[in-house]
Amino acid sequence: MILERYFPKNAKVILQVLEKNGDFELANKMIQAVNIKTIDSLNLEKEFNKNKELFYDDYGLYSSRNNAFEWLNREEWNILKQAIVKDKHLIDSAANILGIEPRLIAMVLIGEQIRLFNSEREIFKRALMPLKILSVGNMISFGVTGIKEFTAKEVENNLKNTDSPFYLGKYYENIIQFKTANIDEERMANLVNYKNHFHSYLYAGLIIMQIREQWRKAGYDISNRPEILATLFNVGFRVSKPKPNPIVGGSRIKVGDKEYTFGGIGFEFYYSGELIEEFPYTKEKFKIKTIENILSN
């Protein structure tokens, strides 16, 4: 009720999550995400803890049409999300093959694409705005999810190296297959394919899953920490060091006149409820597949 006074859009989607999943833990995280965002100007936590009649003062701070997370109210986001929805079937397909929640792949896709709002404004004006298509990187980071060539090779090695902390199991060993002898050329062609972004989503999903597996084996389960998964996706395998209290970070991204981190963008999108119809929350974010359970099904 309190949240609805200031951000009815966020309140509505949180209620929707409760009605659909009955997931009070997730709903609480979504509320806390809003509270973190508004702590400097409107302390919702203080109001939640009040045990008295609610007063409907007009604080004049926010528009009821807005999302609590500022960048999600920008015109650019409305255009970007139309481009993302066009790829829903590809994101879902990659996620289903891997056993990962599609929303997590969408989360890192958004982190890569949102840089167009400022740093690559001309690309945004030429392609994303009029055509509603995603930007395919082709310089250092490739494809719509910004996969570096050496990272793609690490992903492939981790799939087959049974001694690697990133190893996912036998089912995943041949999940990336090449049709030609020129693997480097084929890999690059797959990643920068303008018409089909499937491999971008497949590699992105595998990076998230492999890093999550590394941390799980070390005794730290970050399955329900999308902001940490986004951060580690961005900083890469070599910086991923399992520890008890990981922090949100990664590349700095400027949107308008505000600066965010890659992990912060991931956190805000994930708990914002944006694109909830296309990429709903699931009870289990990871369902590691095995040869045995595939055969039994």
Image (cartoon, rainbow, N blue to C red):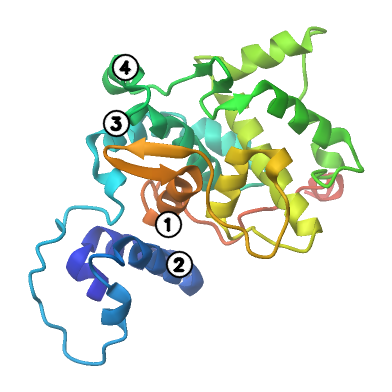
* Sequence order check, earlier mark of 1 and 2: 2
Where disc 2 sits, the SS reads helix
- Which three-letter amino acid code belongs to the residue tagged 1? Tyr
- Which three-letter amino acid code belongs to the residue tagged 4? Glu
Where disc 1 sits, the SS reads helix
* Sequence order check, earlier mark of 1 and 3: 3
- Which three-letter amino acid code belongs to the residue tagged 2? Lys
- Residue under pointer 3: 79
Q: Residue 149: percent from the left, percent from the top?
A: 68, 21
Tell which tag, 4 or 3, sits nearer the viewer.
4
Crowding near the residue tagged with mark 3, few <14, some 14–19, many ≥20 C-alpha atoms within 10 Å:
some
251 and 117: which is toward the camera: 251
Q: Tell whether 46 sits left or right of 150.
A: left
Residue at image x 61%, y 35%? 204
Q: What label does residue 29 carry, if any?
A: 2
* Sequence order check, earlier mark of 4 and 1: 4
Tell me the distance, in whole angstroms, between the alpha carbons under discs 4 and 1: 30 Å
Residue at image x 63%, y 64%? 245
